[in-house]
Image (cartoon, grey):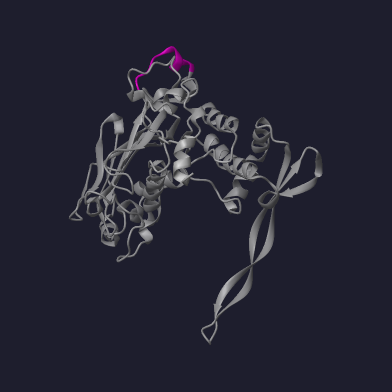
Amino acid sequence: MLLKIELENFFSIKNKICIDFRAGNINSAQSRELQDNVIEWNHQKVLKTIGLFGPNASGKSNIIKAIHFCCRTILESHQYNEGGMFNFMPFKFDHFDSKPSSFFIDFVCENIEYEYSFTLNRSQILTESLFYFPNNRRAKIFVRNEKNEYSFGSVTIPAVKDVIESTSNVNLFLSRANNMNREFAQKIYRYFLNTLMLGLIPLNDKLVEDSFSKYKELILKALAICDSDISDVKLTHEKIKMPIPNIEEQMKIAFKEAEIDSIKIETFHQFNEKISFDIETEESNGTKKLFAVLIRLIDVVKNQKSLMLDEFDASLHTRLADFILDLIHASSKAQFLFTSHNTNLIDVKRLRKDQIVFVNKNNEGATDVYSLYDYKDFRENMDAQKGYLQGRFDAVPYVDSSVQTLKNLLGE
């Protein structure tokens, strides 16, 4: 379960921004009707969903991208070799390109709260720390400072000297410790690997087959609820030929063909259940997107995971976007952070004020993040969508598309 994410100095993100899943103090009649939108944990309420809304180029995608970068660094940095560069750019204005970037995640793993953070620049890890809250009191597990010195708390971590010696300036200690089978790190590593889900699974990935075989009945029922006329879906394996480059003696590039195993997905419709359709070439983008979302979403909901999706409802009807949020809210502890341009979702009858988060660029060209909950004068009997489109919350593009302006543009 996610409690809080803080990000700093990553692409359009300049100063620290916070995505806070800890629910605000809202006790209105409207919020009580949305009690399924929160999780009760450790005497506090935690949000199941947060939507990021704002104009193009405001930084919504960069927030999701920063979380992806953070998680991939945790999962993969033990493989990194010295001399390489981390694949991101810091904020480019105000000399921030020479300043460190930071990542902080406050989360719950096996019912214990943890705080993990690290800072880096493009060439090396600078700091790293892991704290936890046994008996609701913050305690240190380890801290790594800018001099590459380590200190450890009261938790007994056996045989870490060899891990420290093996951790270079481009490796996270947590990642290296997991790779060297240290139990304290493996539990945290598994959280980021198995519980924090990033994006959708490509439809030709083996994970699609694993998830579909486990949840086929649920996925078909969900498709029916979504008013799809798909009555069945079948996954098969097929051999396809792929060209691979071959460097010949004359240094001319030739191509050979290699057979690779691929997954083929076929759909069957109620009108004639004997005729199959190839999902990649014969189904609409909306159907493909819905199937991909359901493959990921059912797993997230059934196993109490957290999911991050950029423009999750692209190619989907607004009622399907509602369905996806309702499915998360119907779960016990699943969570969903998403970006969207669908202003129909800016609705306090569907989302609490603290679930509606606006993303905008400030005068410095940097990403700002704030929620509808921050507007204390906004009452729940007001129309949030209308207020947003009128520019009351700023995070809306101001476009002068009058006919006269466009005539001037075209020189007419």
Question: In percent of the image, x 43 and y 34: which residue is there?
Answer: 53
x, y (%) of residue 329?
51, 27
Q: Nearer the viewer, residue 405 or 346?
A: 405
Taking 206 as reference, is 4 above or below it?
Answer: above
Quadrant hosting residue 164: bottom left
Q: Report the span colored magenta.
A: 24-33
Question: In percent of the image, x 52 and y 38: which residue is there?
Answer: 300
User: In screen coordinates, is 23 left or right of 279?
Assistant: left
Name the outermost residue toward the front: 412
Taking 19 as reference, is 35 above or below it?
Answer: above
Name the outermost residue toward the bottom: 250
Question: In percent of the image, x 36 and y 58: which residue is there?
Answer: 78
User: In screen coordinates, is 84 left or right of 320?
Assistant: left
Question: In percent of the image, x 56 and y 77: which residue is there?
Answer: 246
Q: Nearer the viewer, residue 239 or 389?
A: 389
Name the outermost residue toward the left: 147
User: In screen coordinates, is 48 left or right of 83?
Assistant: right
> Looking at the rendering, in which quadrant would you find the N terminus?
top left
x, y (%) of residue 211?
60, 45
Residue 167 visible in the current orientation: yes
> How many badges with numbers are in the image?
0
Q: Nearer the viewer, residue 88 or 202?
A: 88
Whether residue 180 is in magenta: the answer is: no
Residue 23 visible in the current orientation: no
x, y (%) of residue 240?
67, 64
Whether residue 30 is in magenta: the answer is: yes
